Each structure stands twice: as structure tokens, then as C-alpha cells.
């Protein structure tokens, strides 16, 4: 009797199929989530994504809006602002970027470092985390924020934004991000305006099929400017990527494209009135400067 | 009586050992795929393919992680996994089949057909693959190539990118097997 039990047991081991044998042979190497978001911007603000090593992105961010009761005869829209920028992946985790905006004359540069990567096979970090630091130079006074900072010396026109970006890919379709933000302006024209401002950004994306996703983003400013009314930045958009091109469309209330300007200095609320409604369009072209050897 | 049982158990375990030595494994198998079109050539390679053969039963199994494919452009890797293969949902591709008329004892090169089932994105298709088997006295080398149609595995390609991706993808493989010890 015992003999048959033993024999039955051992043959059942042998009958085990080859695929399940292979299943046990997989090495226990960490698997990381890829593409929590696709582009380096979620919609208007930065996402946790950094560029891979050797990737150069050529970016043209555009914002279009109308001026209320404008008597001119402009074609389609009254106003256009564009930020032309380059982003380069120094390593898979570290990205450098710099750009200039046309209408508001803000020049900016930033570094972004991916500190934590979300693991996909249960163990390890449940979230991804990226550090972001930029510096911007405001070359001219912009309406309606002409008197927010002083324009006497070079140092007066600088602002710095630090962000901690936390994101999690919950399902293959849905990712969410929360972004505590600290913004420092070097100078204030009015003593009542805070030089150090804090904000929290929240955003998410939902993928529709393989190439498009809906995104939304909102930045809540904890201590807004006192001397002038400002509103929180909001954006609702569609991201679309094809081959080496990524396109991001936004319905938003922000006109500026640099963090310190659009987070704390958005002059209007989000609605569809002329002057408040802004249509945004980011075009990103990806170049692979060093390709992997196969 | 007890002694006989012990002896029998020992014997069974010994025979067990013999059957396992019929199995040969590779942990660094190579699979490459190519998509040639007039617009763009896409090429990727996976060097961490697992495969096992059982020479007594002429059976073969292959399993690999789709995200282990390396592309020349890192963006292609992202698109491959995110937009086409959906490796979040279907992380692995597998194959199991039989080598027809396989003679494990014949040294040197023999060309055989493998009949089996290929599973990509949870979709299983019957497939026949011609392979060259090289028996180097205790280790086996299997090489070959075959083609799969993108359509068979329900991989969606947007019309605007249809000229960039071939309808038929050619695949080459190279597996060097060593004796499998558990």
C-alpha cells in the first residue's frame, strides 16, 4: 500500500509539464513599472517621468486665448504664447531641461531626478518619486502681475521652484500623482506678498487604448499673493503619442508654462469666457542620440 | 518487509534522477524579432529566454518576459510594452510543443519540425517551426527562424502607423541547452 502511494507521488512529479518547470526558473530580478505617464509633463505641470539616457526632446508648448471685447481682427485667436525648450536625459534617472517663453519672456532651466521607482511585482516601493528643481528668470513685466516682484537688479527677477513628485500606477490605465510644491521669489514689490509660497498639485491620467489618454491636473496654492487676485491652475486634456511624436492638448486657465508663473500667478479662473479660456497644445519630438547596441 | 520498502523507495528515487537528466535547460536563450518596412526597420532582442527540452519525450517549452526585449531606441521599448503587447496584462509569451522524429542520440546536426502552441497576449495559436538541432555530446543547440502575423495575436496598430510596422514579423532563436539539475 505504502509502495503505491510513494510511486503515485513520484510519477505525479514527473508528469508535471515543462512550462511550469520553467515558471520556477525565472530569476528574482526586480521589475519596475514603466510609463506611469508618457511625457515629461502630465498636462501643464511636470510628471514623475524622466527621459531615458541619450534622449533629446525638442518641445514647443503653445497657449492660445482671446482678449475679451477685443476690437481687432485677429485670425482664430487674439493671443499666443509659446515656450520653446530642450530636454535631455543625462542618465535614465536624471533629466536636464531649459527653455524660453515668448510672450512673458521667462527663461527657465531645471533638473529632475527619479529617486524611487515603483516595483510591479508586489515587493519594493509601491510608488515612484521624483525630485524637481528649477530656476527661472523673468526678463519683463507681465500683465496683470507687473508689480509682483521688483525689476531693479538681476537677482530680483529670479524665482525657484522645488517639487517632490509622488505617483503610482494603480492599473495599466490609471495613474495618479500628488505634487507638494515650494516656490521662492527672490523679490517682492509689496511687503504683503509672500516670497515663499506653497502649493499642492494633484493629477491623474486614464488611458484610452494604446496611444491616447485623458489627463487632468489641479494646483492648490496654500498662501496665494495678497496684492492681486490669483487663481488655482487647472487643466483638462488629452495626450496622444505616435512613434517619435507626442502631442498634448489642454483646456486650461493657465497661460504661462513655467512652474512659478502658472502655479502662483494665474490671473483668471477656469471657465469658457473670452480671456479666461486658454487652449494649450504641446508638441514634443523625441530624438535618440545614443542608440543601444543589440 | 520494511527493508524492501526502503529499497523500493530508493530505487524509485534513483529512477527519478535518471528521468530528470533527460531534461536540458537554457536560461540565456536568445530570441530576436525584425519588422522590415520601407519606412522603418524595427529590431529587438531578448537574451533571457528560458527554455527546456525533455529528450525522452521529445518535448520543448519556452517562456520569456516581454519587457526583457531590448530595442535600439528606448522609446520603442516603451511603446512595445505599453501600446502593443500590453505587458502589464500579458507579461509573458510561451511556447510548448513536440519535436517530430527527434533522435536525441544522433550526434551532429539534424533538421526537424517542432509542432506546438505559441501564446502571446493570452492568445494561443498552433504553429510549426523548422529547427536545426546540434547535438554536442551532452548539450544541445537549437536554432531556427519562423514568422508570425501581427493580426493573429490581436495587436492593434493605429492606421497612421500601419506603414511603419510589418504585417509579418520574422523571429529568430538560438537556444544552447545544458543538463537540467533541480
Image (cartoon, coloured by chain):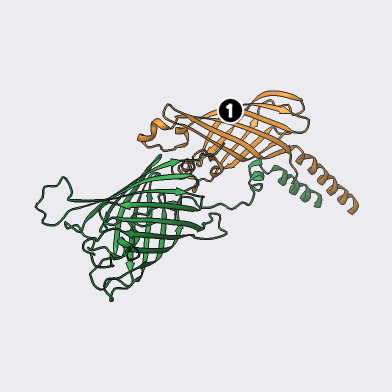
Q: Quadrant of residue A69?
A: bottom left
**Chain A tint in image:** green
Dot 1: element: strand
Q: Quadrant of the C terminus of chain A?
A: top right
Q: Is residue A21 left or right of residue B119?
A: right
- Residue located at (54% from left, 42% from top): B66
- Residue located at (65% from left, 44% from top): A22
- Residue located at (26% from left, 68% from top): A148
Q: Is residue B101 above or below residue A280?
A: above
Residue that carries the numbered disc 1 in the rendered image: B145
A114 or A99: nearer the viewer:
A99
Q: Quadrant of residue A251?
A: bottom left
Which chain's colour is orange? B
- In this view, which residue lies farthest toward the left? A71
Q: Is residue B138 above or below residue A194?
A: above
Q: Is residue A110 left or right of residue B93?
A: left
Instruction: Name the spot of residue A210 as percent of width and height, x first.
Output: 40, 44
Instruction: Name the spot of residue A135 as percent of width and height, x first.
Output: 39, 60
Q: Determine crowd level at label 1: few under 14, some 14-19, many 20+ residues with C-alpha closer than 10 A.
A: some
Q: Is residue B46 above or below residue A181?
A: above
Q: Count numbered badges in the picture.
A: 1
- In this view, which residue lies farthest toward the front? A153
Chain bearing tag 1 is B
A288 or A103: nearer the viewer:
A103
Q: Taking the image as drawn, is residue A47 in sight?
A: no
Q: Is residue B129 above or below residue A154?
A: above
Q: Is residue A112 left or right of residue B4?
A: left
Amino acid at each position: 500500500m505504502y509502495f503505491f502511494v510513494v510511486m503515485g507521488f513520484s510519477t505525479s512529479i514527473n508528469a508535471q509539464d515543462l512550462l511550469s518547470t520553467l515558471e520556477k526558473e525565472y530569476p528574482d530580478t526586480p521589475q519596475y513599472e514603466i510609463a506611469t505617464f508618457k511625457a515629461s509633463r502630465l498636462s501643464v505641470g511636470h510628471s514623475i517621468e524622466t527621459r531615458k539616457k541619450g534622449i533629446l526632446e525638442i518641445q514647443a508648448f503653445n497657449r492660445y486665448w482671446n482678449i475679451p471685447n477685443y476690437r481687432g481682427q485677429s485670425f482664430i485667436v487674439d493671443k499666443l504664447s509659446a515656450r520653446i525648450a530642450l530636454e535631455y536625459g543625462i542618465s535614465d534617472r536624471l533629466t536636464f531641461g531649459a527653455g524660453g517663453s515668448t510672450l512673458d519672456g521667462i527663461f527657465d532651466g531645471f533638473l529632475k531626478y527619479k529617486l524611487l521607482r515603483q516595483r510591479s511585482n508586489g515587493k519594493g516601493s509601491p510608488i515612484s518619486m521624483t525630485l524637481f528643481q528649477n530656476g527661472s528668470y523673468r526678463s519683463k513685466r507681465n500683465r496683470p502681475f507687473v508689480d509682483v516682484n521688483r525689476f531693479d537688479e538681476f537677482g530680483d527677477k529670479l524665482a525657484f521652484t522645488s517639487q517632490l513628485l509622488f505617483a503610482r500606477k494603480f492599473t495599466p490605465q490609471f495613474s495618479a500623482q500628488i505634487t507638494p510644491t515650494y516656490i521662492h521669489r527672490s523679490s517682492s514689490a509689496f511687503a504683503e506678498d509672500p516670497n515663499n509660497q506653497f502649493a499642492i498639485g494633484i493629477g491623474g491620467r486614464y488611458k484610452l487604448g494604446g496611444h491616447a489618454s485623458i489627463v487632468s491636473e489641479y494646483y492648490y496654492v496654500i498662501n496665494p499673493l495678497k496684492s492681486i487676485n490669483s487663481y488655482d491652475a487647472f487643466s483638462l486634456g488629452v495626450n496622444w503619442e505616435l512613434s517619435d511624436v507626442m502631442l498634448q492638448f489642454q483646456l486650461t486657465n493657465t497661460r504661462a508654462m513655467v512652474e512659478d508663473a502658472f502655479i502662483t500667478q494665474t490671473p483668471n479662473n477656469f471657465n469658457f469666457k473670452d480671456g479666461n479660456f486658454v487652449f494649450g497644445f504641446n508638441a514634443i519630438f523625441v530624438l535618440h542620440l545614443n542608440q543601444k547596441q543589440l | 518487509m520494511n527493508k524492501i520498502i526502503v529499497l523500493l523507495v530508493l530505487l524509485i528515487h534513483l529512477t527519478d534522477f535518471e528521468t530528470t537528466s533527460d531534461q536540458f535547460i537554457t536560461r540565456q536563450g536568445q530570441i530576436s524579432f525584425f519588422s522590415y518596412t520601407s519606412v522603418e526597420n524595427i529590431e529587438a532582442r531578448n537574451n533571457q529566454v528560458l527554455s527546456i527540452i525533455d529528450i525522452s519525450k521529445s518535448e520543448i517549452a519556452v517562456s520569456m518576459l516581454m519587457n526583457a526585449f531590448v530595442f535600439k531606441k528606448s522609446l520603442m521599448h516603451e511603446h512595445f510594452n505599453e501600446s502593443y503587447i500590453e505587458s502589464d496584462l500579458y507579461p509573458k509569451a510561451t511556447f510548448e510543443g513536440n519535436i517530430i522524429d527527434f533522435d536525441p542520440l544522433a550526434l551532429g546536426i539534424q533538421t526537424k519540425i517542432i509542432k506546438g502552441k505559441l501564446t502571446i497576449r493570452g492568445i494561443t495559436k498552433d504553429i510549426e517551426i523548422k529547427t536545426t538541432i546540434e547535438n554536442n555530446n551532452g548539450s544541445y543547440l537549437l536554432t531556427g527562424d519562423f514568422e508570425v502575423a501581427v493580426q493573429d495575436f490581436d495587436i492593434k496598430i493605429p492606421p497612421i502607423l500601419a506603414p511603419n510596422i510589418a504585417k509579418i514579423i520574422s523571429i529568430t532563436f538560438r537556444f544552447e541547452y545544458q543538463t537540467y539539475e533541480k
